[in-house]
Image (tube, rainbow, N blue to C red):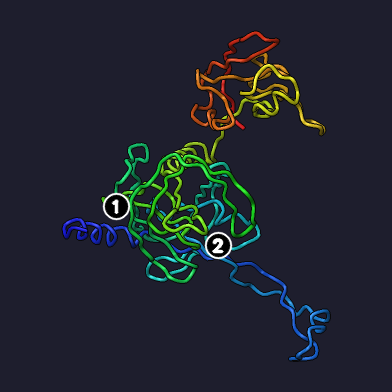
Amino acid sequence: MEQSKQSMIVKTIKKVLLAVVSITISKYLTVFEKPFGPSPFRFEEFFMIPKGRKKIKVGGGSGFIVDSSGIILTNRHVVEDPHAEYIVILNEEKKYRAEVLAKDPINDVAILKIDVKKKLPIIELGDSSKLELGQTAIAIGNILGTFRNTVSVGVVSGLSRQITAVSGLDHQIQRLKGLIQTDAAINPGNSGGPLIDIEGKVIGINAAMVFGAENVGFALPINTAKKCLEDLKKFGKIRYPFLGVRYILLNKELQERYNLPLGQGALVVSEPMPEAEAVVPGGPADKAGLEEKDIILEIEKEKVSVKNPLEDILQKFQIGQIVNLKVLRNKKEIVFKIKVGER
């Protein structure tokens, strides 16, 4: 690495490091004791006696300050457990109990708040829509919940990636989309930390790593988190666009199995449970005239498919916006105008 670039990276890291925080996760768990003392026999496990409850650290993650009043961005899966206590540790080792202000389950973003008396250092948010392959990417975080302020340097090695991730805490499976791929090392505990560019602006939130593969990590694009912050500031919550339909995404296999006219699009269909209508009564789709067995083909000329689901396309539009929905009904294509609602 050339000397001038190396010096710039070092300078950038020093500038942002004070705004990177550690997040510890603790829970009150039942503690057991052995009634007969130490023993070489395994049968004693069946006679363990509960001794009481104790607060135990069960995990950790990272985050970064985006507002000097104490607003922090991290991953949703870091603060997923509603029964856990989250403590934010600042760079000077001061600890604060964190309040979870909002969680975005679709995009794995969470917004925290700590109560501080002074202005905190912040990291400036960049623009992830302007990323280019090969540009410098620097990941900062709290590795394994122990090694704080760990830094790794690499490049942006892929854009708009999609993966299926499993949370290390609750083991829930989640599909993450539109991700930034980087070869900067992202390790357990790094989740929620910033991925920054060479100027020190956040371009992503470290989200996942691939086990069994070297130098393959993923980060959520920062523009997604910026929308969450704007929603919270303006409306007091994160808002989600809503059409009011239940559907399944079609493919060639479903087309052949059920003798459907198409193998692509979203088939509007009810679910076998109470109040699980195909079209939600009074919702945007209901008001526009959509019916069960309609196949939604496009929203604003963007085709619906397994790789480009209806939900993903809908995220691109504003609540209250009028959109054109192309639908196949009885082998005829119809265009409906629908006002996007709020979930």
Residue 209 appears at what percent x and percent y?
49, 55
Residue type at mark 1 is Gly
Q: For label 2, count other residues whose C-alpha is less than 10 Å away and answer few (under 14), some (14-19) or many (20+).
A: many
Horizontal placement of 337 versus 62: left or right?
right
Q: Which residue is mark 1?
A: 200
User: Which residue is rendered at x = 57% and y = 43% of the image?
Assistant: 175
Quarter of the image where one finds residue 268:
top right
Residue 338 appears at what percent x and percent y?
58, 17
Nearest the viewer among 317 and 87 is: 317
User: Which residue is rendered at x = 49% and y = 67% of the image?
Assistant: 144
Horizontal placement of 115 versus 266: left or right?
left
Q: Are marks 2 and 1 in contact (CB under 8 Å)?
A: no
Quarter of the image where one finds residue 118:
bottom left
Q: For label 1, count other residues whose C-alpha is less than 10 Å away and answer few (under 14), some (14-19) or many (20+).
A: many
Quarter of the image where one finds residue 168:
bottom right
Q: Is residue 249 above or below residue 108?
A: above
Residue 241 appears at what percent x and percent y?
56, 30
Q: Is residue 284 above or below residue 130?
A: above
SS category of the residue bearing label 1: loop
Q: Which residue sits furthest left?
A: 4
Q: Which residue is mark 2?
A: 86
Quadrant into which the C terminus falls:
top right
Quadrant into which the N terminus falls:
bottom left
Report how far apart the C-alphas of labels 2 and 1 lie in the structure. 27 Å
Tell me which numbered mark, 2 or 1, is placed earlier along the sequence: 2
Nearest the viewer among 116 and 42 is: 42
Q: Is residue 168 above or below residue 255?
A: below
User: Which residue is rendered at x = 62% and y = 72% of the image?
Assistant: 56
User: Which residue is rendered at x = 74% and y = 77% of the image?
Assistant: 52
Residue 302 appears at what percent x and percent y?
50, 22
Residue type at mark 2 is Tyr
Horizontal placement of 132 versus 116: left or right?
left
